[in-house]
Image (spheres, grey):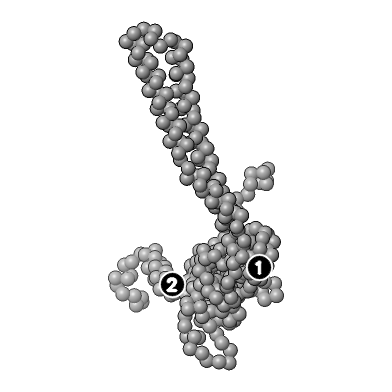
Amino acid sequence: MSRLHPMYRRVAPWQRLLVAMLSVLTFGASVKAADLVINDCRVKIIDQLPLASDRAGVLADMNLREGESVVARQRVARLRDDVIQAQHAIAQQKADYTAEVFAKEKAHQISQNVYRQALDANRESARTVPQLELEKMRLDMELAAFEIERAKHDLQVHKLERDQAAAELQAYAILSPVSGVVTKIFKHRGEAVRQGDPVVEITSTDRVKVEGWLTLTQSFQVAQGSPVKVQIDIDDEEHPIEKQVFEGRVTFVDVVVEPTRGQVKVTAEVVNQDNILRAGLKARMTVAPSNSKTAAKVILPAIPASKKNP
């Protein structure tokens, strides 16, 4: 004799199966995948830039020292630029000179007035101004208009020459593209510099990367953009900074399995609060796993028509 509740006995078998499936799905959705903890990670520098000169010359300005902080777009060095400074000043004077255009416009106005007065005179009294002279006045007026265009063109060329000289002048200065710390000085004031020679090295400390290793199974649970939390792990020592948490995101999950380890490298970019994280430090990284179904889904590239089987 069945012990099922009378109401349940009245439910069709397919309805019972549906309820059971919904229960399983609901239970599965309520279980959250555990965070992945990756030990033995290493902190590495992202931006370490040896800044070079785009010109050959003599270093005229170099007052930085190792350990000194710089900000983005700050001039860190300058080559001797006396000649290009003079060329830029000349080009600036030419670009600012607009009197030529003004004079040509006045000459055009005068030629217009002369031509109109001649036409008015002929309207009042025919042939007051001979036709040949009238044509010459009209030609003078048109030539004066062309002179305005040429003066404007010359002025525009002078402005372009000024901009070119300004760009060349900037090439004699070495600017830091990032904010950071001077970590190495290659050249000093008064030394000769060839094009492409490194002058100073700037290391950015605003952000760092943390590298670790995942098993192949774990790698399918991590995707680019997954949030991470990083903590410093100092061997044989307890330090307050080990409790500080640095947040970031996964920027790279390797597509190659390292043959010796049999593992996959994962890299995260982390905001370096107070410049505490230093290259070479050991760290522990906690990664929030992405949707495993989405992460493990493989999308095959389309096969070109020429390579398809006939």
Q: Nearer the viewer, residue 98 or 268?
A: 98
Snapshot quadrant of residue 196:
bottom right
Q: Residue furthest top?
A: 126
Q: Residue at x 36, y 11 (%)?
A: 122
Res. 265 image quadrant:
bottom right
The residue that mark 2 highlights is 28
Measured as percent of width and height from the top left, residue 263 is found at: 63, 74
The residue positioned 47% from the left and 75% from the top of the image is: 247
Q: Quick check: 60 left or right of 275?
A: right
Identify the element where label 2 is drawn.
helix
Q: Is residue 205 visible in the rendered structure shown here?
A: no
Quadrant where the N terminus lies? Answer: bottom left
Residue at position x 32%, y 71% in the image: 8
Please report the residue visible at 53 percent of the width from the left and 79 percent of the height from the top.
277
**Residue 152 % position (x, y):** 48, 36
The residue beneath circle 1 is 190
